[in-house]
Image (cartoon, rainbow, N blue to C red):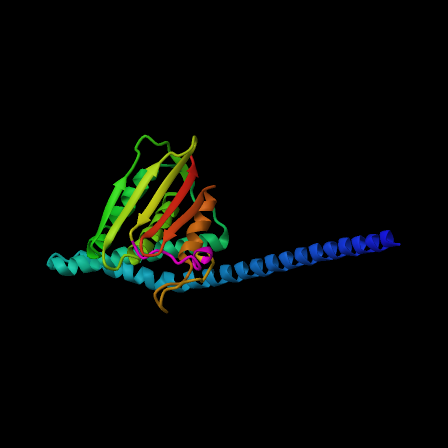
Amino acid sequence: MPVKVRGRVSMHSSLAENLTDECRIDEDFLEQLAWNEKMAELGQLAVGMVHELNTPLSVIVSAIQLILREEELSTSVKEMVERIEMEVQRLSLFTRGLLSFARKEDGTVGETDLNQVLHEVMHFLKYEAQKRSIKVVEDYDFRLPQIAADVNRLKQIFINLVMNAFQAMNEGGSLLLRTFSAEEQFISVQVADTGTGIPKQILPHIYEPFYTTKKTGKGTGLGLFITKKLVESFSGTIIVESTEGEGTCFTLTFPAM
């Protein structure tokens, strides 16, 4: 008699486990459906946003070009206009990346020198680093092979990461950009800052769309989301290590050609 009872308990236990597994599968499936729907809505929003921004951006670019043609501009005015031009270009890169993601465009992928891309990005952001009293250290391994990527998208990736680092160092600090080969046939890039760091409870959410800890009007919560998608579009990976009060380090790895 006890054997039968144990058999029934075992049978009921097995049935309960099966039902639990099915419920878990259903929950996962529903969660994936909700995520896909959210991504579709994001894509539609991105397309509308980019079209709304492109017209005023074009007007600003034209105005900047006309102003810079003036011969009697003071040094301070010229620097301010050049700063405006830099910010417009950064915004254009952002909207272009957002639109590419929404439309699942692949971009123009070719042989790309990662060191050269990083050097151009830092030249582009040199004024911003000086203004924030940030020391930039560039440590590149120039023996590295090239990678298969789109130059403009790579620039967007590193502009996003560097600007995030700058914003985490309001009172000055140091930024390290380093390229190296940790494994055969792979190239890595580190973007490390001495900023405020990311709290542990926030770290798992930093790549989620529209997730931001910045004040209203200071961030969209899309920068790291798009950055991760762009890295993955080149078969790359991105990981982050951060300690509150000490800084943050992003490590990106791409397959070499």
Q: Which residues are magenta?
A: 195-205
Residue 210 in picture, x, y percent from top left: 45, 62
Residue 206 in picture, x, y percent from top left: 43, 57
- Figure quadrant of the C terminus: top left
- In the image, is residue 192 above or below residue 198? above
Residue at the spot x=47%, y=53% of the render? 101
Decide which of 2, 111 is in the foreground and name it: 2
Left or right position of 100 against 78: right
Is 175 one of the magenta-colored residues? no
Query: Extreme right residue here?
Result: 1
- SS assignment for the magenta stretch, majority: loop
Left or right position of 37 against 20: left
Q: Report the label total.
A: 0
- Figure quadrant of the N terminus: bottom right
Decide which of 68, 189 is in the foreground and name it: 189
Residue 244 in picture, x, y percent from top left: 35, 56
Query: Extreme bottom residue here?
Result: 216
- In the image, is residue 35 above or below residue 230? below
Residue 172 in picture, x, y percent from top left: 23, 56
Decide which of 23, 212 is in the foreground and name it: 23
Residue at the spot x=46%, y=50% of the render? 229
Decide which of 121, 60 is in the foreground and name it: 121
Is 200 one of the magenta-colored residues? yes
- In the image, is residue 149 above or below residue 205? above
